[in-house]
Image: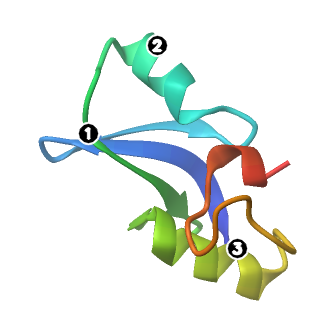
Amino acid sequence: MKITHIAIKLKGKVYKEPIGSSHNEIEKKHKIKEGNRGFLTDKGEWVNRQEAGKIALKSGQVKSMDTPPYLHSGDLK
């Protein structure tokens, strides 16, 4: 499994952008100010930052994170 998108989940809707984007960019683009920051997997599943960190490490997408165990959009370069 791999991380494919940066995402924010708000009121049952998921706002997403490809890797290389940031959660702040999603908030600005979709004019939202709250929600749960997370990521989407290649299975289309939304996961929180901690789950995403485990997935990204296991898949080799990242070797380290700025604030482990939480993945941030900037960790995926």
Give the residue type that dot 1 points to.
Gly
Three-letter amino acid code of the residue under disc 2:
Lys
Q: How far apart are the alpha carbons under marks 1 and 2?
A: 14 Å
The answer to which of marks 2 and 3 sits earlier in the sequence is: 2
Q: Earlier in the sequence, mark 1 or mark 2?
A: 2
Q: Is residue 5 above or below residue 68?
A: above
Nearer the viewer's eye, disc 1 or disc 2?
A: 1
Q: Residue at x 48, y 72 (%)?
A: 50
Out of 35 and 15, give the one closest to the viewer: 35
- Total count of labels: 3
Instruction: Label 1: state its secondary structure.
Output: loop
Circle number at residue 29: 2
Q: In this view, does 73 lie to the left or right of 23?
A: right
**Residue nearer the viewer, 69 or 8:** 69
Q: How crowded is mark 1: few (under 14 residues within 10 Å), some or many (20 or more)?
A: some
Q: On screen, 56 above or below 44?
A: below
- Residue picked out by circle 3: 56
Give the residue drawn at x 55%, y 21%: 25
Residue 67 image-quadrant placement: bottom right
Give the amino acid type for the residue marked by disc 3 in the picture: Ala
Q: On the image, which quarter does residue 41 sit in?
A: bottom right
The residue at which mark 1 appears reads as 35
| Rendered image: mark on residue 49 | none
Q: Residue at x 70, y 73 (%)?
A: 56
Residue that lies at the very extreme toward the left in this rendered image: 11
Instruction: Report the quarter where the N terminus lies.
Output: bottom right
Q: Position of residue 43 (x, y in %)?
A: 51, 72
